[in-house]
């Protein structure tokens, strides 16, 4: 095996070890750390229906569009987070 391949394998093993020590898990399509995803109740700005939204708190500032589970209208979500905690969550009609 080439030295470069060995270095890459060693780096990958180090990353996996660090993730395991932080309670992270690896699935077929996901990489998740325990406590990094937080569920928050929100209300659609159009129909007023409430539902749960899961926010990945490992991303400090995020802005994305999602659809209401009831009326299907898109709305914007702006979140400020620190790992494991949502600092602010703003829901705006598009």
Image (cartoon, helix red, strand yellow):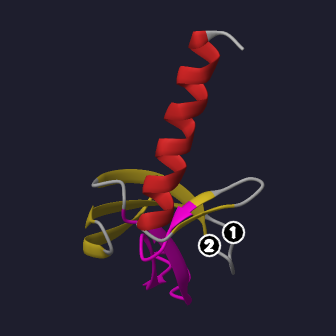
Segment tinted magenta in the rendering: 32-57
Q: In this view, does 40 lie above or below 29?
A: below
In the foreground, 62 or 7: 7
Q: Is mark 1 on a helix, strand or loop?
A: loop
Viewed as shown, does residue 63 lie left or right of 52?
Answer: left
Does 50 appear in magenta?
Answer: yes
Q: How crowded is mark 2: few (under 14 residues within 10 Å), some or many (20 or more)?
A: some
Residue sticking out furthest to the right = 28
Viewed as shown, does residue 60 lie left or right of 69?
Answer: left
The structure residue drawn at horizontal position 47% and vertical position 57%, both measured from the top left corner, is 19
The residue labelled by disc 2 is 68
Q: Residue 54 carries which label?
A: none
Q: Residues within 10 Å of mark 1 (few under 14, many from 20)?
A: few
CA distance separating discs 2 and 1: 5 Å
The structure residue drawn at horizontal position 43% and vertical position 66%, both measured from the top left corner, is 21
The structure residue drawn at horizontal position 58% and vertical position 11%, both measured from the top left corner, is 3
Q: Is residue 36 above or below residue 11?
A: below
Decide if residue 25 is in sight here: yes
The residue labelled by disc 1 is 72
Viewed as shown, does residue 21 lie left or right of 8?
Answer: left
In the foreground, 37 or 75: 37
Q: Are the residues flagged by discs 2 and 1 in contact, CB closer than 8 Å?
A: yes
Viewed as shown, does residue 44 lie left or right of 29?
Answer: left
Q: Is residue 83 above or below residue 43?
A: above
Decide if residue 94 is in sight here: no
What's the magenta bit mostly, secondary-structure-wise?
A: strand
- Picture coordinates of residue 35 (x, y %)? 42, 77
Does 44 appear in magenta?
Answer: yes
- Picture coordinates of residue 65 (x, y %)? 52, 54
* Quarter occupied by residue 88: bottom left
- Picture coordinates of residue 49 (x, y %)? 56, 89
């Amino acid at each position: 095996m080439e030295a470069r391949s060995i270095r890459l394998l060693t780096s990958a093993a180090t990353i996996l070890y660090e993730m395991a020590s932080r309670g992270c898990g690896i699935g077929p399509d996901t990489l998740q750390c325990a406590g990094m995803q937080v569920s928050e109740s929100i209300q659609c700005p159009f129909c007023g229906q409430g539902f749960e939204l899961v926010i990945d708190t490992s991303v400090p500032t995020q802005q994305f569009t999602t659809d209401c589970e009831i009326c299907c209208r898109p709305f914007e979500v702006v979140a400020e987070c620190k790992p494991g905690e949502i600092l602010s969550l703003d829901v705006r009609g598009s």
